[in-house]
Amino acid sequence: MSLTEELQTSCSATWNAVTQHQFCRELSDGTLADSRMAAYLVQDYTFLDNFVRLAASAIAHAPTLQDSIPLAQFLAVVTGPENTYFHRSFEALAVTEQDWKEPELWPATQGFQAIMTEARLSGSYSRMIAVLVVAEWSYLEWATPFHPAPETLPFYLAEWITLHAGPEFEGLVAYLRGQLEAAWPTLDAEEKEAVTDIFHRTVSLEKAFFDTALTP
Ligand SMILES: Cc1ncc(CN)c(N)n1
């Protein structure tokens, strides 16, 4: 079993709760209320700034140029088509700029912001990559069974699936996992523990985020 499979298996109950979450099922079959999708997207959009900083920091800490290129290219997707997706969705869901610019953050959102900041400021490439592995791999896993999204879904549901599935996104996740696996043998025991810990805490935060998104 590969290292990233081991990490995933070591928190499989929480991991499966994320990747088989009711929120994702409702999103994918179109039964998710627009108000829930709107609230989720408003919270999720607040991650973008922090995500870009985390990815940029990981790029800065990558061992070689070659190691940094897939993440640099992914940043272009996040700041391009994904950023535009949020704005088109806000318009379609009647979310005003006032609503999305400075929303009251859910505790799960605050937790996620904090762990991204923690990873970025840690100076540890492996911890940065561990958070990114969880964020992207867990989304690939929930979205893949629903890809391609049915044409009957409104674009703000269908494109959220499309952004997190398919060969390009699979390639990104494989690259991120590969980065962590390549770094792992070079880490001392303390750092391995820190990476494992931040991996597990990120999985728990993904679950808390979806749970909150469905909370009445
Ligand atoms: C909370 C969360 N985790 C992961 C992703 C996938 N980029 C996301 N958009 N939001």
Image (cartoon, rainbow, N blue to C red):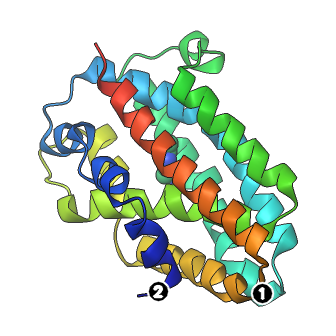
Q: Residue at x 34, y 30 (%)?
A: 211
Percent of width and height locating residue 113: 67, 36
Label 1 sits on residue: 186
Label 2 sits on residue: 2
Residue 117 in view (yes/no)? yes
Percent of width and height locating residue 106: 53, 20
- Closer to the camera, 39 or 157? 39
On screen, residue 139 versus residue 17, left or right, reads: right
Q: Which residue is drawn at 44% across and 34% down?
A: 209
Residue 163 in view (yes/no)? no
Say above or below: 123 vs 178. above
Circle 2 sits in a helix, a strand or a loop, which is it? Answer: loop
Percent of width and height locating residue 206: 46, 43
- Quadrant for residue 78, please give it: bottom right
Q: Which residue is drawn at 41% across and 21% down?
A: 39
On screen, residue 60 versus residue 210, left or right, reads: right
Quadrant of the frame with the N terminus: bottom left
Say above or below: 117 vs 129. above
- Closer to the camera, 108 or 145? 108
Percent of width and height locating residue 65: 82, 85
Circle 1 sits in a helix, a strand or a loop, which is it? Answer: helix
